[in-house]
Image (spheres, grey):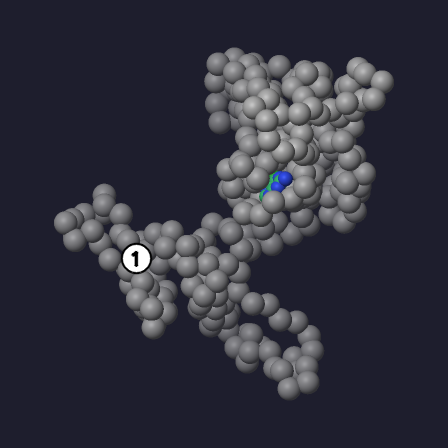
Amino acid sequence: MRIDVVTIFPDYLAALDLSLVGKARRAGLVDLRVHDLRDWTLDRHRTVDDTPFGGGAGMVMRPDVWGRALDDLLPEPSGPDDTVGPGPAAVAAGAHLVVPTPSGEVFTQRRAEELATEDRMVLACGRYEGIDARVVERYRAAGHRVSELSIGDYVLNGGEVAALVMVEAVARLLPGVVGNPQSLVEESHGAAGLLEYPVYTKPPRWGDAEVPEVLLSGHHARIDRWRRDRALERTAARRPDMIAALDPETLDAHDLEVLAGLGWRATRDPRHPADSRYAARWEHVAE
Ligand code: 6GU
C-alpha cells in the first residue's frame, strides 16, 4: 500500500519511522510518503490560509493550494464503479482521499479495515478552522473515494495526530506487518463486538496480587469461557453501547446468562415474537 500524507508540519509524522510501522516501511510493506503542503504554494510567503468568507474567527486553508497538491498526488479514478480487474480479486483503482476533521464521521476499526483494502491512500491534514469545503466536493465529484473522518469527540489543533492514528491503525492490518496474525483476531473492536478480556503474565504472584487460578490450569475450554465472561462484563461496564449493538442470536446460553446478571435481557419485537426477520433487541435494567 502507498500512503501519501500532506501537512504543513511534516515533522509531526516522524513517529512513523518507529516501531511496527517503521519496520513495515523498511520491509517495503507500506510505502509512506510525507509531503509539505507549502511546496505547492506559489507566493513568496508560502501562504496556505486566508480569512473565512462570511466572517468568524480563525483562518481557512485555501482550495487552490490544496488543489495543486492533490492533483499531483491523486491517481486518476477509473471507470464508473471505480474497480479494475476481474471478479472478487478486483482492487479499487485510484486512491482513497482521507481528510481528518473533528466534523467527520467516526474513524472505527471497520473504517480501518476498509482503508486497508486500498492500494493508495492520501491523507490531507488541515490546520486552523479547516480546509475550504470546495476541495472535498471537487474530488468527490471527480469520482474519487473521499472520507472526512474524526478520531473521537474532542478537538485537536490539526489533522496530523489523527493521521498518525489512522496510518497506524491501517498499516497494522496490512499482510505481514503484525508478526502473528492471530493477535489481530482476538482484540478489542474485533468481530466479536466485545472489548478484550484482561491479560496477565509472569510472575504469577506479584506482592499480594495473584493471577486468576483458571489461567494456570491448562483447561483450554475453561480459560476460553472465563475470558469470554470477563469480556462481557468489561464491555457491559465500559461500553454499554457495544452490548446494545450485539445480535443476541450470536450469543450462547451462558453469554445470555452472564448479561442477564448484569441487567441485560434480550427481547424480541413483541409484535413478531418468533419471526427472525425482526431483530431482537435489548432491555437494560439498572441493578
Ligand atoms: Cl481528525 N482533527 C482535529 N483537528 N480534531 C479532531 C479530529 C481530527 N478528530 C477528533 N478531533
Looking at the image, which residue is at 67% across and 48% down? 178
Left or right: residue 68 compared with residue 182:
right
Neighbour tally class for label 1: few under 14, some 14-19, many 20 plus, Cα within 10 Å: some
Residue 77 in percent (x, y) is at 58, 16
Is residue 64 depicted above or below 262 in this figure? above
Tell which residue pokes out farthest to the right in this image.
44
Determine which residue is flagged by label 1. 282
Residue 213 in percent (x, y) is at 55, 80
Is residue 13 depicted above or below 222 in this figure? above
Residue 17 in percent (x, y) is at 80, 42
Left or right: residue 229 compared with residue 4:
left
Residue 255 in percent (x, y) is at 37, 65
Looking at the image, which residue is at 41% across and 59% down? 240
Tell which residue pokes out farthest to the left in this image.
271
Looking at the image, which residue is at 22% across and 54% down? 268
Q: In which quarter of the image is the C terminus?
A: bottom left
Task: Locate ligand 1 by image quadrant.
Answer: top right
The amino acid sitting under disc 1 is: Trp
Looking at the image, which residue is at 59% across and 68% down? 199
Q: Nearer the viewer, residue 8 or 185?
A: 8
Q: Which of 63 and 146 is in front in this view?
A: 63
